Image (cartoon, rainbow, N blue to C red):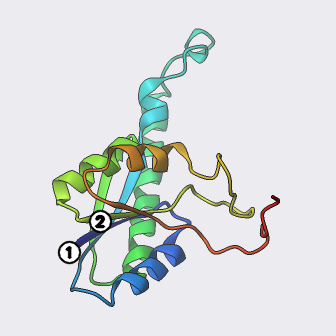
Amino acid sequence: MRVLYCLDGTNVAEVTQARAMLSAGEPQTLGILYVIDSGPREEGRVRERFFRRPDPPPSREQEILQTERASAKDILEEGLRHLPDAEPLERQGRPEREIVNGAAEWHADLLVICPRSQYGGKPGLGPKSVGHVARFVLDHAPCPVLLVRPRTQEQFPIAR
């Protein structure tokens, strides 16, 4: 089974736990994927283009790209510390599309993704708990998708 784990820089613990739960079965070929999101710079913002130049100066654009590549390298290295036998994959583009296309090109049998990046606060439940990237992947993936949520007890029991 080929299992592709999607990293966002905040979900290594959840991904590692999912792998431990899945590893009891057949042998797995593992991949870890991180996507450098180039969308906001590529698409531009409709109103902002009238207020200032549409693109940052070339030197600033290069700085941004170098920083994003360094961050991607750090995130993939962290993933490899937890999943040392995984194949690291790095892509650039819109994360939702690159995850789906990457899973298809890598011939994934299962795609593991978290519902949204958690920076600090409590994991949310309810209709806004699944971000647009995870929702797109759930709707368009070429294989089954395992959505891994962080464990939480604070929001239970749910009011009836």
Determine the image quadrant of residue 76: bottom left
Residue 6's x, y, as percent? 40, 62
Judging by the rendered image, the residue that carries numbered circle 2 is: 110
Residue extending furthest toward the front: 160
Residue extending furthest toward the bottom: 24
Residue at figure coordinates x 47%, y 52% from the top left: 67
Q: Quadrant of the N terminus?
A: bottom left
In the image, what residue type sits under mark 2?
Leu
Residue 149's x, y, as percent? 56, 67
In the depicted structure, whether residue 130 falls above or below residue 119:
above
In depth, the one of 154 and 63 nearer the eye is: 154
In depth, the one of 121 and 158 nearer the eye is: 158
- What kind of element bears circle 2? strand
Judging by the rendered image, the residue that carries numbered circle 1 is: 1
In the image, what residue type sits under mark 1?
Met
Cα–Cα span, label 2 and label 1: 8 Å
In the depicted structure, whether residue 49 falls above or below residue 2:
above
Asked if marks 2 and 1 touch (Cβ < 8 Å), the reply is: yes
Q: Is residue 132 left or right of residue 105?
A: right
Q: Quadrant of the C terminus?
A: bottom right
In the depicted structure, whether residue 25 falls above or below residue 30:
below
Residue at figure coordinates x 53%, y 68% from the top left: 11
Q: Which mark is residue 36?
A: none
